Amino acid sequence: MSDDEQFEIEPIFAAVLFEDRIDLARAYTERLAQDSDTFGLLGPRELAKIWSRHVINGALLAELVPEGATVADVGSGAGLPGIPMAIASPNSHFTLIEPMERRANWLIDVVRDLGLSNIDVVRMRAEDVERTDFDIVTARAVAALDKLLKLLTPLLRGSELKTVLAMKGSRALVEIEEATPGLKKLGYGEPEIITLGLGRAPETATVVRLRLQ
């Protein structure tokens, strides 16, 4: 992070959301800002929204994760949303799946340095992961929903919850419509669009939730 790049001041809601783990969230946010340019984690303009658009936004998904669930974060990149979710949900286990070596190594270092024992990092493409029993699979800015589900579905088939949480913005409804022909073929029920943080967070998170039947 260069001196002329604006870094967002921590919103009050961050302490409400992370509670007694706020120091971990702060440490992660500082590391993300510090290493962003070197590892290509976030665009420079995103540092002005690093808390509200990225860290808090990601942690809001933890509200949809039952305690004790196993979660795979596909295309984790900067650890979003996986690391904020894991900080906010310490009794669930998270696997960050990232194919790029330098980003995967960065994730490994951050997880180790922060002592996040409920996170594993796997440097691999999602389609090469052999495990099929994750309760929940998350993804953010990986691909359009129709292509994304083809990547995520094999990771869920052996679990009980069989749930996809795809972070989507204003195009959520459009992407659902485009993916509809393939949903039944893959075995999914009716998709839900969920808005998290409304009236509480600086920015809401829009999530498409789907469950395998």
Image (tube, helix red, strand yellow):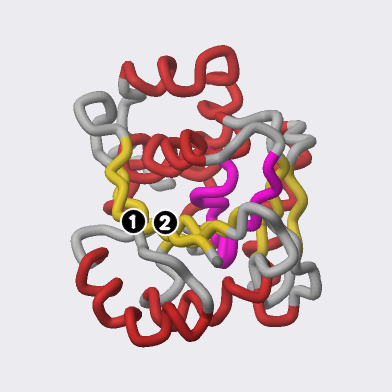
Figure check: 8 above or below 177: above
- Observer-nearest residue: 112 or 122? 122
Q: Residue 17 in the image: x percent, y percent?
A: 44, 22
Q: Is residue 124 left or right of residue 9?
A: right
Q: Residue 116 in the image: x percent, y percent?
A: 73, 35
Amino acid type for the residue under numbered disc 2 = Arg
Q: Mark 2 highlights which residue?
A: 209
Look at the numbered discs 2 and 1 and tell me whether their residues touch, using CB distance below 8 Å. Answer: yes
- Observer-nearest residue: 112 or 34? 112
Q: Mark 1 highlights which residue?
A: 192
Q: Secondary structure at mark 2?
A: strand
Give the position of the C terminus as an image quadrant.
bottom right
Q: Residues within 10 Å of mark 1 (few under 14, many from 20)?
A: some
Furthest residue in direction top, as rendered: 20
Amino acid type for the residue under numbered disc 1 = Glu
Of the two numbered discs 2 and 1 on the same chain, state the one appearing first in sequence. Answer: 1
- Observer-nearest residue: 178 or 106? 178
Q: Secondary structure at mark 1?
A: strand
Q: Is residue 198 left or right of residue 116?
A: left
Q: Residues within 10 Å of mark 2 (few under 14, many from 20)?
A: some
Q: Quadrant of residue 130?
A: bottom right
Inter-mark Cα distance, 2 to 1:
5 Å
Figure check: 80 above or below 157: above
- Observer-nearest residue: 187 or 170? 187
Q: Residue 25 in the image: x percent, y percent?
A: 53, 29
Q: Is residue 126 left or right of residue 109?
A: left
Please tell me the numbered disc located at residue 52: none
Residue stretch in magenta: 69-84
Figure check: 71 above or below 50: below
